[in-house]
Image (spheres, rainbow, N blue to C red):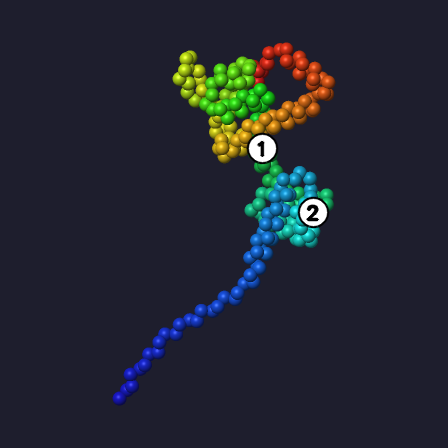
Amino acid sequence: MEQPEVQSAPETEEAIPEEPRPANLSAADSADAQLKALVEAVIYITDEPLSADQIAIALQQPAEKVGRVLEELTAEYNNPEHGLTVREIAGGYKMSTKPEHHEAVRAFVKNLKPAVKLSLPALETLALIAYKQPITAPEIMDVRGVQGAGVLKTLLDRKLIATGGRKQVVGKPILYKTTKEFLVQFGLKDLSELPTLKEFEELSRLSVSDGESESEPPEQAEAATAEASHEPEAESSE
């Protein structure tokens, strides 16, 4: 009589335990990645070539470590999927577009709209509209103390402001507000990113000081200011 075949239970694969990773590996990798990102950012924002020693001193890191990071960045940006390159120039490192893309980049830049340049009266008017919108022309004149029809036309032509209906008061004056183009030109996500009025006043003061120092000597600037105080402000030339 044949013995019934006894089937053994299927063998289960034993899970191979993973080798424990050193506890400090993750932290070290994170620190290296952060240093690499910082070096990349520093090279990006600087016009002049930076040496490994300069970067090391600024970031308070060993020069040898920074040197290795620069070599990694140079190799990484040499890959064809990158339009930029990190090159060693005049004893330092600099980020720039790759030579093979120069013609295409040059043609693209030629088609870009010129940067928005505004006079101080136009900037003041735009600031008033940005912070007080919607606002009417008479309300703007009350704050600035001068007629601003020419400035408003300039801002409308440049699509930095637009009309936003009429205020329901006597005469029903037009209301003005900023546009999407305003956010684009000033690099803002939305109006909540506008600087505070105090910060804006500081920027205005600095721009006026820079403009005066570059354009004319102090004596001439004072004379021009004295003259302007006796004449109405000309804004229609905007």
Mark identifier at residue 57: 2
Q: What element carries label 1?
A: helix
In the image shown, does 50 or 98 lie closer to the viewer? 50
Give the farthest residue toward the bottom.
1
Residue appearing at x 69%, y 47% in the figure: 57
Residue appearing at x 47%, y 24% in the figure: 133
Q: Position of residue 138 (x, y in %)?
A: 49, 15
Give the farthest residue toward the front.
198
Reply above or below: 199 against 87: above
Q: Within 10 Å of the Cα at label 1, are there few (<14), some (14-19), or many (20+) other Cα atoms?
A: few
Residue 77 in sight from this viewpoint: no
Q: Alpha carbon of mark 1 to alpha carbon of mark 2: how far?
A: 35 Å
Mark identifier at residue 109: 1
Reply above or below: 136 against 197: above
Residue appearing at x 53%, y 65% in the figure: 20
The tag earlier along the polypeptide, 1 or 2, is: 2
In the image shown, does 104 or 118 lie closer to the viewer? 118
- Residue 204: name its quadrant: top right
In which quadrant of the rendered image does the N terminus lie?
bottom left
Say left or right for 218 vs 128. right
Q: Where is residue 222 in the image (x, y as percent from the top left)?
A: 70, 17
- The three-letter code of the residue at mark 2 reads Ile
